[in-house]
Amino acid sequence: MRKIIDTMAVVGFLLSGSMTAALVISYLQFDNFMDESMERIGGQVTEHIEAELEGKIKDVMPKLPEATGPAMPF
C-alpha cells in the first residue's frame, strides 16, 4: 500500500513539474510566437486582398491617351 501511495506522489510531482515547465516555456516564447503568427497572417491577408482587387483595379483605371493635342495658349 505504501508503494502505491509513493508512486502516486511521484507521478503527481512529475505532472505538476511538467505543467510548470510548460507554462514557463510558453510564457518566455509568447512574443516570438505572436510575431511569427502576425507575419504569417499579414502575408495571407495581403495576398487575399491583392487577389480580390487585381481585376477591379484594371477596370477602374482610365486609359492613357496615345496622342495629345497642341499646347494651350496663355
Image: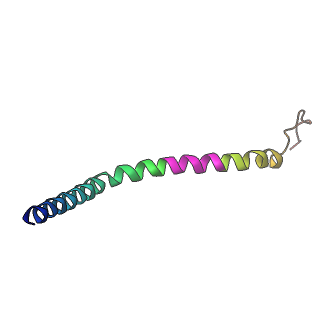
- Taking the magenta stretch, the answer to whether it contains residue 13 is no
Above or below, 26 against 65 in this view is below
Residue projecting furthest to the left: 2
Could you say where residue 41 lies in the image, as x and y percent from the top left? 52, 51
Which residue is drawn at the image coordinates 7% and 65% (left, top)? 2
Question: Is residue 74 found left or right of 50 in the rendered image?
Answer: right
Quadrant where the N terminus lies? bottom left
Residue projecting furthest to the front: 1
Main secondary-structure element of the magenta-colored stretch: helix
Residue 74 vs residue 61, the one in the foreground: 61
Could you say where residue 39 lies in the image, as x and y percent from the top left? 48, 47
Above or below, 8 against 55 in this view is below
Residue projecting furthest to the top: 67
Counting every numbered tag in the picture gives 0
Residue 12 vs residue 29, the one in the foreground: 12
Question: Is residue 71 found left or right of 53 in the rendered image?
Answer: right
Which residue is drawn at the image coordinates 41% and 50% (left, top)? 35
Could you say where residue 45 lies in the image, as x and y percent from the top left? 59, 51
Residue 23 vs residue 58, the one in the foreground: 23
Above or below, 17 against 39 in this view is below
Which residue is drawn at the image coordinates 91% and 35% (left, top)? 70
Residue 62 falls in image quadrant? top right
Quadrant where the C terminus lies? top right
Could you say where residue 26 lies in the image, as x and y percent from the top left? 30, 55
Residue 14 vs residue 74, the one in the foreground: 14
- Taking the magenta stretch, the answer to whether it contains residue 41 is yes
Residue 7 falls in image quadrant? bottom left
Colour logic? rainbow
Which residue is drawn at the image coordinates 67% and 46% (left, top)? 50
Looking at the rendering, the stretch of residues picked out in magenta corresponds to: 40-48
